[in-house]
Image (tube, rainbow, N blue to C red):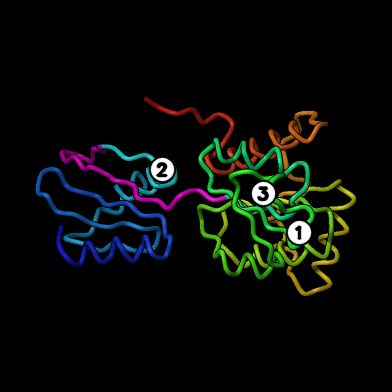
Amino acid sequence: MKRRTFDALRKAQADRIPAALVTDLGTGFQTVVTEATQQGDCALEDEFLPQVYEAIVKDRSGILEFYDGQFFVNVLNSPLRMILVGAVHIAQALAPMASLAGYDVTVVDPRRAFATDERFPAIRLNGDWPDEALEALRPDRRTAIITLSHDPKLDDPALMTALSTPAFFIGALGSRKTHAARLERMQTQGVQADRLTRISGPVGLDIGAVTPAEIAISILAEVTLALRGGPKHKAEG
């Protein structure tokens, strides 16, 4: 690997930008591809790039063919992360489920009585106020952010901060009435209505969930849907 290719790869990883190292198996030329850039030995054809982007989104490395050429696409995405705001009962169920699904989970709650190691064994806890915690955690395109506290003092600033990040999923727990009131509050604080459409609320697929564990399942299912691209998508191979 040439130095400039290596540097481009390191920068993408340091900035937590989804990327792929594409190697032309015929020539050995290598190119680092992100959504916005290409850096390396040569520029890839515009008609070929959608296949590379799709591999990045699906987080799936492998050989792709384009006309007579073969290319090994090595996807080098940052780890999946999930940030939960509110150390409530649903978070106790959702955090271990999300960990099993491959997420690096952080529970944010400044209320020390809720965010304890006893209630969240093996889960990273953050006791800062949610907006400060999110700014420090720097959510990227591989991050899901979900507010669960039902407390506007915690959820609202977290959501407003989340909207300034490229997180692939932002969700908020609460009834439709609660969510409508939340959106109204945020608009009065200057958030544009079109930006609020990024928030999924009430978060979770409608599966008739009742218990905290069932609600956690519905939330994780919706996050998975957002990550993988649709109910009809099925893994290949």
Task: Please give the name of the residue rendered at 41% of the width and 43% of the height, measured from the top-left corner.
Answer: 59
Q: Judge from the rendering whether residue 16 lies leftward or rightward of residue 113; answer left or right.
A: left
| Position in image of residue 20 (x %, y %) | 32, 51
Q: Earlier in the sequence, mark 1 or mark 3?
A: 1
Q: Judge from the rendering whether residue 189 lies leftward or rightward of residue 19; answer left or right.
A: right
| Position in image of residue 163 (x %, y %) | 65, 64
Amino acid marked by disc 3: Asp
**How many angstroms separate mark 2 from mark 1 (CA)?**
37 Å
Q: Which residue is mark 1?
A: 112
Q: Please, what secondary structure does the residue beneath circle 3 have?
A: loop
**How many marks are shown on the rendered structure?**
3
Outermost bottom residue: 190
Amino acid marked by disc 2: Asp
Q: Earlier in the sequence, mark 2 or mark 1?
A: 2
Q: Earlier in the sequence, mark 2 or mark 3?
A: 2
Q: Which mark is residue 236?
A: none
Amino acid marked by disc 1: Arg
Q: Which region is colored magenta?
A: 63-81
Q: Nearer the viewer, residue 104 or 179?
A: 104
Q: Which residue is mark 3?
A: 117
175 over 198 or under it: above or below: above
Inspect the magenta stretch and tell me whether residue 198 lies in it. no
**How many angstroms separate mark 2 from mark 3 (CA)?**
32 Å
Q: Residues within 10 Å of mark 2 (few under 14, many from 20)?
A: some
Task: Please give the name of the residue rendered at 15% of the width and 57% of the height, measured from the top-left corner.
Answer: 1
Foreground mark, 2 or 1? 1
22 over 230 or under it: above or below: below
Q: Nearer the viewer, residue 128 or 155?
A: 128
Q: Judge from the rendering whether residue 141 lies leftward or rightward of residue 112; answer left or right.
A: left
Q: Residues within 10 Å of mark 3 (few under 14, many from 20)?
A: few
| Position in image of residue 42 (x %, y %) | 18, 59
Q: Which residue is mark 2?
A: 59
